[in-house]
Amino acid sequence: MKAEATANAETDKATKERVEKLNTADALVFQTEKQLKEFGEKIPAAERTTIENAVKDLKEAHASQDIDRVDKASEVLNNAWQAASQHIYQAQQDAGAGAGADPGAQGSSNGSNAAEEVTDVEFEEVDDKK
Protein backbone atom coordinates (compact mmCIF):
# COMPACT_ATOMS: atom_id res chain seq x y z
CA MET A 1 0.00 0.00 0.00
CA LYS A 2 2.88 2.36 0.80
CA ALA A 3 4.53 1.48 -2.48
CA GLU A 4 1.34 2.31 -4.34
CA ALA A 5 1.02 5.66 -2.55
CA THR A 6 4.65 6.49 -3.30
CA ALA A 7 4.21 5.52 -6.94
CA ASN A 8 1.18 7.81 -7.30
CA ALA A 9 2.56 10.72 -5.26
CA GLU A 10 3.68 12.72 -8.29
CA THR A 11 0.40 12.19 -10.10
CA ASP A 12 -1.54 13.16 -6.98
CA LYS A 13 0.55 16.30 -6.55
CA ALA A 14 0.00 17.35 -10.17
CA THR A 15 -3.72 16.68 -9.91
CA LYS A 16 -3.95 18.68 -6.71
CA GLU A 17 -2.14 21.67 -8.26
CA ARG A 18 -4.39 21.49 -11.30
CA VAL A 19 -7.56 21.46 -9.20
CA GLU A 20 -6.32 24.30 -6.99
CA LYS A 21 -5.52 26.47 -10.02
CA LEU A 22 -8.93 25.80 -11.53
CA ASN A 23 -10.64 26.61 -8.22
CA THR A 24 -8.61 29.81 -7.87
CA ALA A 25 -9.54 30.83 -11.41
CA ASP A 26 -13.21 30.14 -10.73
CA ALA A 27 -13.09 32.23 -7.56
CA LEU A 28 -11.29 35.03 -9.40
CA VAL A 29 -14.00 35.12 -12.07
CA PHE A 30 -16.75 35.20 -9.45
CA GLN A 31 -15.05 37.90 -7.37
CA THR A 32 -14.29 40.06 -10.40
CA GLU A 33 -17.85 39.88 -11.71
CA LYS A 34 -19.15 40.79 -8.25
CA GLN A 35 -16.81 43.78 -7.99
CA LEU A 36 -17.67 44.93 -11.50
CA LYS A 37 -21.33 45.06 -10.51
CA GLU A 38 -20.49 46.98 -7.35
CA PHE A 39 -17.81 49.38 -8.64
CA GLY A 40 -18.34 49.30 -12.41
CA GLU A 41 -19.46 52.92 -12.71
CA LYS A 42 -16.23 54.11 -11.09
CA ILE A 43 -14.04 52.37 -13.68
CA PRO A 44 -13.34 54.05 -17.03
CA ALA A 45 -15.02 52.30 -19.95
CA ALA A 46 -11.75 51.25 -21.61
CA GLU A 47 -10.47 49.56 -18.46
CA ARG A 48 -13.85 47.97 -17.79
CA THR A 49 -13.78 46.49 -21.29
CA THR A 50 -10.26 45.16 -20.68
CA ILE A 51 -11.41 43.51 -17.46
CA GLU A 52 -14.50 42.02 -19.09
CA ASN A 53 -12.38 40.59 -21.92
CA ALA A 54 -9.91 39.15 -19.41
CA VAL A 55 -12.80 37.52 -17.50
CA LYS A 56 -14.10 36.05 -20.75
CA ASP A 57 -10.65 34.64 -21.60
CA LEU A 58 -10.29 33.18 -18.11
CA LYS A 59 -13.73 31.54 -18.34
CA GLU A 60 -12.77 29.97 -21.66
CA ALA A 61 -9.44 28.75 -20.28
CA HIS A 62 -11.22 27.35 -17.22
CA ALA A 63 -13.76 25.54 -19.40
CA SER A 64 -11.00 23.96 -21.50
CA GLN A 65 -9.00 23.25 -18.31
CA ASP A 66 -5.81 24.43 -20.00
CA ILE A 67 -3.66 25.24 -16.96
CA ASP A 68 -1.06 27.31 -18.83
CA ARG A 69 -3.81 29.39 -20.38
CA VAL A 70 -5.54 29.73 -16.99
CA ASP A 71 -2.30 31.03 -15.47
CA LYS A 72 -1.81 33.59 -18.24
CA ALA A 73 -5.45 34.71 -18.22
CA SER A 74 -5.41 35.04 -14.42
CA GLU A 75 -2.32 37.21 -14.59
CA VAL A 76 -3.86 39.43 -17.27
CA LEU A 77 -7.04 39.78 -15.23
CA ASN A 78 -5.15 40.61 -12.05
CA ASN A 79 -3.09 43.26 -13.84
CA ALA A 80 -6.17 44.80 -15.43
CA TRP A 81 -8.00 44.83 -12.11
CA GLN A 82 -5.07 46.47 -10.32
CA ALA A 83 -5.07 49.31 -12.83
CA ALA A 84 -8.82 49.75 -12.43
CA SER A 85 -8.68 49.57 -8.66
CA GLN A 86 -6.62 52.75 -8.64
CA HIS A 87 -9.59 54.55 -10.21
CA ILE A 88 -11.96 53.04 -7.66
CA TYR A 89 -9.71 54.08 -4.80
CA GLN A 90 -9.41 57.60 -6.19
CA ALA A 91 -13.18 57.88 -6.61
CA GLN A 92 -13.71 56.78 -3.01
CA GLN A 93 -11.09 59.23 -1.78
CA ASP A 94 -12.72 62.06 -3.71
CA ALA A 95 -16.14 61.15 -2.34
CA GLY A 96 -14.77 60.86 1.20
CA ALA A 97 -12.88 64.13 0.98
CA GLY A 98 -15.95 65.92 -0.32
CA ALA A 99 -18.17 64.54 2.44
CA GLY A 100 -15.59 65.06 5.15
CA ALA A 101 -14.71 68.63 4.16
CA ASP A 102 -18.23 70.05 4.52
CA PRO A 103 -18.86 69.27 8.22
CA GLY A 104 -15.35 70.34 9.14
CA ALA A 105 -15.79 73.62 7.33
CA GLN A 106 -19.00 74.32 9.23
CA GLY A 107 -17.34 73.54 12.57
CA SER A 108 -14.48 75.91 11.81
CA SER A 109 -16.74 78.74 10.72
CA ASN A 110 -18.76 78.85 13.94
CA GLY A 111 -15.77 78.29 16.20
CA SER A 112 -16.93 75.05 17.83
CA ASN A 113 -15.92 71.51 17.12
CA ALA A 114 -17.53 68.42 18.65
CA ALA A 115 -14.13 66.86 19.36
CA GLU A 116 -13.17 69.86 21.53
CA GLU A 117 -16.22 69.42 23.77
CA VAL A 118 -15.29 65.94 24.98
CA THR A 119 -14.17 65.78 28.62
CA ASP A 120 -12.87 62.95 30.78
CA VAL A 121 -14.51 62.52 34.16
CA GLU A 122 -14.02 60.10 37.00
CA PHE A 123 -16.87 57.83 37.95
CA GLU A 124 -17.69 55.41 40.72
CA GLU A 125 -19.77 52.26 40.33
CA VAL A 126 -22.54 51.93 42.86
CA ASP A 127 -23.86 48.51 43.75
CA ASP A 128 -27.60 48.89 44.46
CA LYS A 129 -27.88 45.36 45.91
CA LYS A 130 -26.14 46.25 49.22
Image (spheres, rainbow, N blue to C red):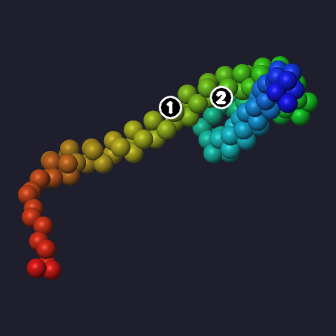
Query: At 13% from the left edge and 78% from the top edge, which residue is drawn?
Result: 128
Q: Residue at x 72, y 30 (%)?
A: 51
In which image quadrant can residue 80 be found?
top right
Circle 2: residue type:
Trp
**Drawn side of residue 4 relative to residue 71, left or right:** right
Q: Position of residue 59 (x, y in %)?
A: 83, 34
Q: Residue 61: in sight, yes or no?
A: no
Query: Residue 114: percent from the left, percent from the top?
Result: 20, 52
Q: Which residue corresponds to mark 1?
A: 90
Q: Is residue 128 left or right of residue 62?
A: left
The residue type indicated by label 1 comes to Gln
Q: Classify residue 10 as left or right of residue 117.
A: right
Percent of width and height locating residue 89: 52, 33
- The quarter of the displayed image where residue 68 is located: top right
> Which label number is shown at residue 79?
none
Is residue 119 at least partly visible in the picture?
Answer: yes
Label 1, secondary structure: give it.
helix
What is the distance, in whole Å, between disc 1 and disc 2 at their CAs?
A: 14 Å
Task: Name the mark nearer the viewer: 1 or 2.
Answer: 2
Q: How many marks?
A: 2
Tell which of 18 and 110 is nearer to you. 18
Q: Name the foreground residue: 21 vs 42.
A: 21
